Amino acid sequence: MPNAFNDCNRGGGVESDKIPEMRILFCGESFPEARRRLATRLTDDEIVFCERSALREAIAHADVAIPLMSRIDAAMINASSFRLVQQWGAGLEGVDLEAARSKGVHVANVPATGNNADSVAEHIILLMLTLLRDLPRCQSNVRKGLLGIPAGKMLAGRTVCLYGLGAIAHATAQRLCSFGVRLIGISREPTAKKIADLKLEACYSVADREAALAHTDMLVICSRMTQETRGAIDAAALRALPAGSYIVNAARGGLLDYNAFYNALQSGHLAGAGLDVYWDEPISPIDPILALPNVIATPHIAGVTDRSYEEIAVVVAANIDRLRRGIEPLHCVV
């Protein structure tokens, strides 16, 4: 009889003749560095990963599920015996939290603070400068032997709007101050403290976002993904942005309304966009968004750095150890 893990692969852990203490399943093939980092810390456990097509079968035999970008729905939760859904990072929008609560399954994440927030902030700066200096065209011109073109645009003096003022926005604002930008923000709860902490010139409520967007040269999306924020950057928000503005998104793809966003890019209303996250991940290589010449795309790597992943691995390994000792994991949302 075929083993339930025939379609899965070992990502580290115990040798085949040793009974593992825990079977930890990475749900999908993406983010391989996460498996490697965790395997160095949990040498007595079995760490496996599987293709998404095999997830429903594989997850039923796991003690811990690490969802990555896979959906963990009620049917999977109810048909399985795993005791912990542990995200490798902060986002849990793909996990059915109510089903987990009903089944008594712990759900935990790793808050986007520290080295993770710093890593994402650095990548946001990279995308901003890549757009303004048209880096793909620069590389092409080097190969063509062309000098002195294209002319770039300076970041200094531009108005940058941070949409969402959590840990990543804080880390980004800290770095942007040295570029001489005018920094504004949009938050559910704008306060004088947020203005002071992030050194903002102004902070607007979500209800007044169009007033903020009307002054924005570059919109940086830092919001969390929830049912309320899905598609928040819609046609109205995009129309409010001045012609020739830019968008950078390293938060979640679903925060942008796909059709409205595509139309704004194709029409030239948006000068360009830097994307590290997508509506479906991995994004299809033939997605029309990727064919647009004013789009810079990276493969969800903003938080994938040496220091960020080592910090996350420490928390994930600690939570798995807490689970085996009967102690409630840290950073539980359920």
Image (tube, rainbow, N blue to C red):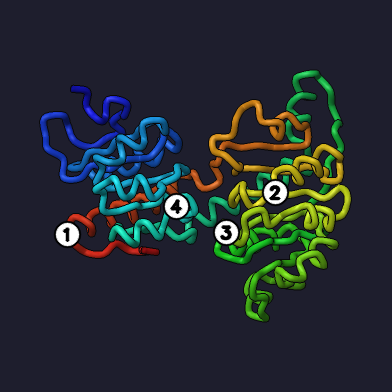
Question: Which sits in the foreground, 258 or 145?
Answer: 258
Instruction: Verify CB contact (< 8 Å) between mark 1 and mark 3.
Output: no
Q: How many marks?
A: 4
Sequence-wise first label, 2 or 4: 4
Q: What residue is pinned by disc 3?
A: 227
Q: Is 304 on the left-hand or right-hand side of 165?
A: left
**Would residue 156 be seen by someone viewing this image from the given angle?**
no
Q: Secondary structure at mark 1?
A: loop
- Quote the CA–CA distance across marks 1 and 2: 44 Å
Residue type at the position of mark 2: Asp
Sequence-wise first label, 3 or 2: 3
Q: Residue at x 86, y 31 (%)?
A: 148
Residue type at the position of mark 1: Arg
- Quote the CA–CA distance across marks 4 and 3: 19 Å
Q: Secondary structure at mark 4?
A: loop
55 vs 93: above or below: above
Residue type at the position of mark 4: Gly
Q: Which mark is residue 57?
A: none
Q: Residue at x 75, y 20 (%)?
A: 143
**Which of pointers 4 and 3 indicates the residue nearer the eye?**
3
Circle 2 residues within 10 Å: few <14, some 14–19, many ≥20: some
Q: Which mark is residue 257?
A: 2
Q: Residue at x 83, y 43 (%)?
A: 271
- Quote the CA–CA distance across marks 4 and 1: 23 Å
Sequence-wise first label, 4 or 3: 4
